[in-house]
Amino acid sequence: MEGDLIKIDKWMMPLSWLYGAVTATRNWLFDIGVLKSISYPIPVIGVGNITVGGTGKTPHVEYLIRLLSEHYKVAVLSRGYKRQTKGYLLANSETKMQDIGDEPWQVKQKFPNVYVAVDSNRRNGIRHLLEDEATRDVEVILLDDAYQHRYVKPGMNVLLIDYHRMITDDALLPAGRLRESSKGRRRAQIVITTKCPAGITPMDFRVVQSALQLRPYQQLFFSTFRYGDMQGLFNGKTRPLRSIEAEEHVMLLTGIASPEQMKMDLRRYTRHITPVSFPDHHFFTPEDAQHVEDEFKKLSPPRLIITTEKDASRLRQCTSLSEMVKQSLYALPIQVEIMRDEQTKFNDNILGYVRKDSRNSKLAEGKN
């Protein structure tokens, strides 16, 4: 059920009240115009969350890339969390993961024809995308994880909420995982409840809808994960999920904020799931590699290791993995599916906004 992964440290609540006062004041200053938000002459779609990590942001950004890149030149702008560079950087085919961060690097590898740039200053990043010779033909900008970056005003905000960690039941940092009050959801035009179980019922939908109490201008969608075939990171093999035997032992190796839904989904294939978890965006060390090998040896054959695509980008950089681990290691691709037969409705909302807010549309309006 929704909210089943929420844990609140009540003894930290006084600090959360202080944190809430600061974030509320900041949002109020933006709302009354003391702090300025800037809008731009091309479609800008912000994809983000109110909680700290774990809402499935990257798969949803990839969904939008697939939808939009058929018709428009798309750019993705991220801050490049944990990268080893500073300032604005436009990725190319030779860019290293350490230079832009694991998520932007993953996006660039999967979508080489899409502009992928990083800059913690989103205004500066957008300025470069619009003015630099290499990217000035951009037609749509996707802002990755910028919901709290209010110095930029996207034409459309897409807010992601984890089905298992509803923001209406959570608490502010540090007691909970909210970056700002759940009232911040009012800034979104589209709200997506993510990571929904495949067997979600109509009553579950209504419970979420009632809890969020969205405004008339907001639209609510629900999404779930669909998994592709497992891809061997080092062995060159491909395995469908259905090939996992009921008695096969699976190590779920992750360095993401919330692997619980993935764990639950894998249990449909085998009950032998051993999670080995690291912090979000974790760079694997030789000590980590040894720990993974030690834990893997404890599993009875047949056995394999499954990881996420995001973790795969960092595991490929770890030169200390043993040959046994390498030959057993598979990445599980994830794609998003909009539920309740509303994919066309969702797509039309996104494409309609982009068409209306495009440069060509505005030029035509000016001439008229």
Image (cartoon, helix red, strand yellow):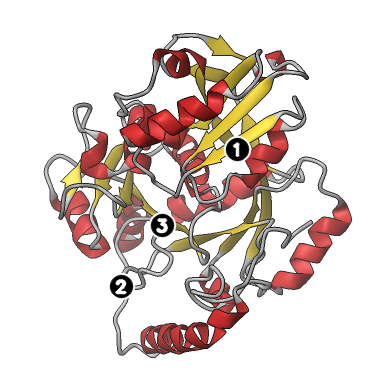
Q: Give percent across and percent down for residue 352.
A: 52, 51
Q: CA distance from mark 2 to mark 1?
A: 39 Å
Q: Give percent across and percent down for residue 13.
A: 56, 83
Mark 3 or mark 1, whichever is nearer to me: 1
From the image, tell me which residue sits under label 2: 151
* Left or right of 246, for residue 158: left
* Residue at figure coordinates x 25%, y 46% from the top left: 117
Element on which disc 3 rests:
loop
> How many neighbours does mark 3 have within 10 angstroms: few (below 14), some (14-19), or many (20 or more)?
many
Q: Give percent across and percent down for residue 81.
A: 31, 52
Residue 84 or residue 359, whichever sits in front: 84
* Residue at figure coordinates x 74%, y 32% from the top left: 267
Mark 2 or mark 1, whichever is nearer to me: 1
Residue 207 or residue 36, whichever sits in front: 207
From the image, tell me which residue sits under label 3: 145
Q: Given the image, on which type of amino acid does mark 1 rest?
A: Pro
Q: Earlier in the sequence, mark 2 or mark 1?
A: 2
Element on which disc 1 rests:
strand
Q: Given the image, on which type of amino acid does mark 2 rest?
A: Tyr
